[in-house]
Image (cartoon, rainbow, N blue to C red):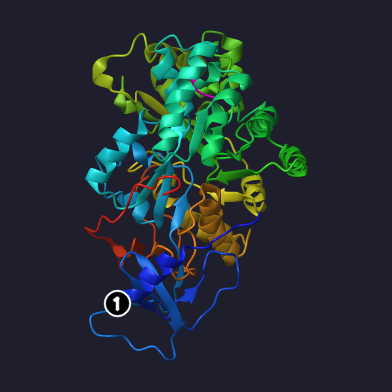
Amino acid sequence: MIQSFALPLLALVAAAAQDPSLAITGARLADGSGGPIVSGKVVLVAGDSIQAIVDERTWKAPAGVRVIDGKGLVLSPGFIDMHTHADSSLVAKPDAVTQIRQGITTALGGQDGGSSIPLADFFAKLEKARPAMNLASTVGFGSLREKVMGEDNRRPARPDEILKMKALLDQDMRDGAFGLSSGIEYEPDSFSTTDELVDVAKTVKPYGGFYISHVRDEGAKVIDSWRELTVIAERAGIPAQITHIKLGSVSSWGKFAQYTALMKEADAKGLKITADCYPYNFWHSTLRVLVLSRLYTDMAEVKRGVDDNGGPTNIILTDYAPNPSYAGKSLAQIAKEKGVDPYVLYMDLIKETDPKNRKPEWGDDVESILGISMQEDDIKGFYKDPRVMVSSDGAIDGGHPRGAGTYPRFLGRYVREAKVVSLEEGVRKMTSLPASVLGLKDRGRIAAGFKADLVLFDPATVIDTSTIKDPTAAPVGIPYVIVNGEVALDNGVATAARAGRVLRKGR
């Protein structure tokens, strides 16, 4: 994969002309390229950009320049999260502390087929809120379907409806979207056909956009679902990304070799297929994804779906609006307390939270679950693939610990402890690789003229502390985070600086 990091000459000249406001000394420099880590350099920041990288032996701090001593630390580009749900609450919680503390400086929203339509309205609100981190967005395929088809969306779209979706998508691409996202394991995306997805996805090609998908099935039919993504990429003529890639159920275990074969096939065709992965063996979703046949009253289907996802003891409710006391308990625990069969309990929960039975006071997020059903060896295998980057799939103050701990966990457990990849490669997976997929030519690297999105971390101690019981606990080993030249995390403490920006494709 060839990556271009050329910057316009004017940007370099502008950065060089300013007086530096910040200098980082003493750190080992992992520039994001995957190349060797170097020492003895000072990174100078002027305004929102990296002004220069100079020799530490000859540099003297001018008056008025803040100096951050990075001795014992690694300085890397800010982490770019290719799958976030922070956008759902970033306007209300612009400090995004759970993201900033783990080193995320840029994130991609509009995931799993859900986004604001039109995006321009959301962008205006977000700019007014002044977020602490940068946010880019895709356009949600499911949101397009709901906008055009209304409540009558549990079917394939008609040609006239597809044209309307394409028109809405085209406008959002003009307004700066980076591509199209789908969540075709969920409703209403799941009622679409491959042909429909291809037709809509073709809209993003003239803008250099890409397709990112929560695929149709992450369990028993996961290989077929990945293959569908490659078909969409090939027929639409665009790059595509498998988001939060996983072998997510018992019936999918042992299929890693089939993933490798499929990616070789895609490479042979010249397709640009990438993926992102979070470093946890449990996922966060809804009760309804357990039974993809949607036959929620069929005991055999319910039992098959629950057992394939780890069984009643490994399905844990994180939210349940009709009875908040269920939060933190497994299906097995709740069933034992109520004296009922756990599979019958599942049917009752599905019925109670059916859209037809929901009460207004429950709000939009009625229920959610954690499912413990992935194997550690598969996660390690994905991270060894050079095309796979790191993502959180996390939310601000969310119920899954990935929302607060993904990046320190990856660095601590998979880079330092398990040595799945080198530190240099690990940093690349969090920085320049996602930047190259998005086409961000001024982020994801430490180089003169690039935006000053930077993270200082201690490679010997960095680790997550967030857990299922305490999902927002702060990590350790990341003392400084800088966003667009301003210190957002200062010696481990979040500051009042909110220097994040809305990033628009091509601007």
Amino acid type at image mark 1: Asp
**Which residue is found at the position 44% from the left and 91% from the top?**
57
Quarter of the figure that contains the N terminus: bottom right
- Residue 465: x and y in percent read 41, 54
Q: Which of the 4 quarters of the picture holds residue 482?
A: bottom left
Does the magenta portion include 164? no
Q: Is residue 393 visible?
A: yes
- Write the residue at 56% across / 36% down: 205
Residue 388 against residue 239 in the figure, above or below: below
Residue 188 % position (x, y): 48, 18
Q: Secondary structure at mark 1?
A: loop
| Foreground of the two, 168 or 9 | 9
Does the magenta run of residues contain 187? Answer: yes
Residue 393 vertical placement versus 159 (above, below) = below
Residue behind mark 1:
19
Q: Which residues are the magenta region?
A: 184-188
Indicate the position of residue 233 as horizontal and vertical percent values: 64, 34
Q: Residue at x 51, y 80 (%)?
A: 39
Q: Is residue 393 left or right of residue 266?
A: left
Q: Residue at x 55, y 48 (%)?
A: 437
Quick one: 44 or 303, which is closer to the camera?
44
Q: Position of residue 315 (x, y in %)?
A: 49, 29
